[in-house]
Image (cartoon, helix red, strand yellow):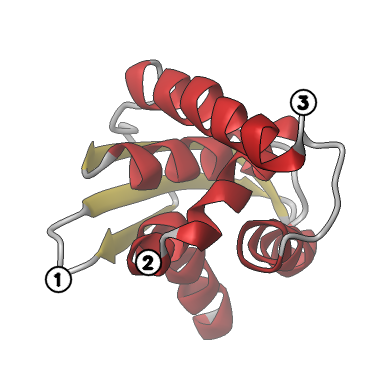
Amino acid sequence: MDTESKLKQLYRSVILELNKNPYHYEEMEAPDHQIEAYNPLCGDKYKLYLQVEAGKIKQASFSGFGCAISKASTSILVQRLEGMAIEDIPAMKETFLNIAFEGAPTSDEEFEAFAAAKAFPGRSTCVSLSWDSLQEWLDQQ
């Protein structure tokens, strides 16, 4: 299977599955932090909920609505955050965006699924929306 066909298949399987069955897609009752991610151009809008303990993300979830790409991307973000040290988040974000937008090589099929999005520049905000909002929150800490 050539690279383009592989990316299309990953895009279909990973993104559509995460859109249908997102990870921790629920409001958190007592989050330590709530982060809003909103794209006024397309209407995608999410809330990220975090519980932080001793410099690590103890629990993460999200709620809201948007296209399949933004929902799947947010789902992966929330899943990867759990157990992660806050100081390690920027490196993970950089890795994800380099794979998604620059086609950086990876063995991570979930991240790689978003590499197909680079063929659709108008969808770049859908891929990075929650990641960028999380970075804005980090920058304010």
* Mark 3 lies on residue: 1
Whether label 2 touches label 1, CB < 8 Å: yes
Q: Tag 1 or tag 2, which sits nearer the N-term?
A: 1
Depth order, front residue of 128/135: 128
> What's under tag 1, amino acid-wise?
Leu
Determine whether, in the image, residue 141 is placed left or right of residue 38.
right
> What's under tag 2, amino acid-wise?
Thr
Please, is residue 109 above or below residue 129 in the view?
A: above
| Quarter residue 6 falls in | top right
Q: Tag 2 or tag 3, which sits nearer the N-term?
A: 3
Determine whether, in the image, residue 128 is placed left or right of residue 7.
left
* Mark 2 lies on residue: 125
C-alpha span from label 1 to label 3: 36 Å
* Mark 1 lies on residue: 41
Depth order, front residue of 24/120: 120
The answer, for residue 31, to whether it is visible in the render is: no
Residue occupying the point 67% across, 62% down: 93
